[in-house]
Amino acid sequence: MSFEKNFCPSPWYHMRINNAGHYEYCRWAIKSERRVEASIREVEPIVWFQKHMSGVRQAMLNGTTVPGCSDCIKMEQHGKVSGRQRQLLKIGVRKESFVPALQSSSWMSPLSYSQDNNGDTDQIPQDWQIDLGNYCNSACLFCNPHSSSRLATEWKRIGIINSVPKSAWCEDPGLLESFLSMLKSSPTIRYLHFIGGETVITPAFVKILQALVDADLQHEISIGFTVNLTIWDADLINLLSKFKLVQLGVSIECFHPVNDYARYGSNITSVRQVLDAWLESAEQYNWLVQIRPTPTILTILHYPTIYEFAIPRNITVESCNFLNDPTYMRPTVLPMEYRQPIIDKLTAVAATIPVIDDTQVINTRNQYLNASQLRQDITSYVDYLKNSPDESYRLPELVAYLKKMEASRKNSVLDYLPEYEKLLRTAGY
């Protein structure tokens, strides 16, 4: 096969249901480019997976670049582990040994089946991303109304949007029960990743977990989710402890007060306390933990503090991707003269981590490779900041947005980032 440059096995065992109940072919695909054809209201999940995703699978087999894959391509360009590389590893394949590894993989038979059947498959999803709506108690500046009910309410009040998003699919008892029936009758389900909103306060999260436990499926299924570090719930911890494995993501942008400005609704002091509680639970139950930041122009200056916290605690750090949207929040909106001190600081932090093995760490959940993963993640951001084009032409758009939000919140970015005053003033702040 000669399609290794663009091939990803994900469409043979993974799919996503978004907040509206529409199916998507990938958790990593760029939001504006995800393939959406039908919802759970119209088509059974397994039918959509086996038949409606045929075009994506056929494109993969033909070596064609699927439009939504551009984020993974960018990540690989800068040495950051992409979703595609993770999915390849799940079938025992690495890029550097693609052909022989794939030829010996047990997945050759399903791939051949799809090749002979116009992209159809007889497989059943093993790996789901389940979007539970936008119910959230935070209003992060880099977020959007579809992921934060609090931000949606604020945007409507100040005139950025005319209406708030509709209720999530999982708030419909009939749809939720239908989805649960599918999960309980699927013998190969192995991993469920949940996002919100703030997952842990979304009622459907507990309902799904409890239904799986009641069906005695918890011993076979791993659970993944991310918390915004505003809540710790003992009852939820007890429920999660019943599952085979929990992959816990903790969201924080930096250990500096600007975290409160970017993640509005948070307080860095209480965030630290809640973080300690989650880390204690994770240690008790042997969960996998990752710090899951979303580096933006607002927080990248103090982003090194995340690694300084993680390194001595042997915790990995991993953003989902390089921020794509909103475009004016990208770290690359900083001119190079502002990027360079950050590059220098990140480089210095990376130098504190001993080099054990330069081989790229694809399995970032392997705790024995945490040090290498941390160094790798740092250097990917160094490369990204060094080599990505200057997007400082987006600064006026950023300033316009910040001024509108600050008028609502009665705060000022300059109280948190005085280092950016000259830059922002020249852009109209």
Image (tube, grey):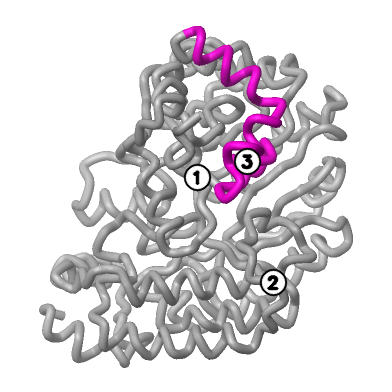
x, y percentage for residue 182?
66, 16
Front residue (pair 207, 102): 102
Residue carrying label 2: 357
x, y percentage for residue 350?
58, 83
x 62%, y 65%: residue: 291
Mark identifier at residue 135? 1
In this rendering, the label closer to the viewer, 1 or 2: 2
Q: Is residue 154 magenta?
A: no
Q: Is residue 230 visible?
A: no
Which SS does the magenta portion mostly show?
Answer: helix
Rendered image quadrant of residue 295: bottom left
Say few, some or many: other residues with alpha carbon within 10 Å of mark 1 (under 14 / 14 to 19 / 20 or more). many
Cα separation between marks 2 and 3: 30 Å
Sequence-wise, which precedes: disc 2 or disc 3?
A: 3
Cα separation between marks 1 and 3: 17 Å
Q: For the residue marked with disc 3, what is the amino acid? A: His
x 66%, y 67%: residue: 316
Whether 231 is drawn above or below 166: the answer is below
x, y percentage for residue 125?
63, 24
Front residue (pair 234, 117): 117
Residue carrying label 3: 193
Q: For the residue marked with disc 1, what is the amino acid? A: Tyr
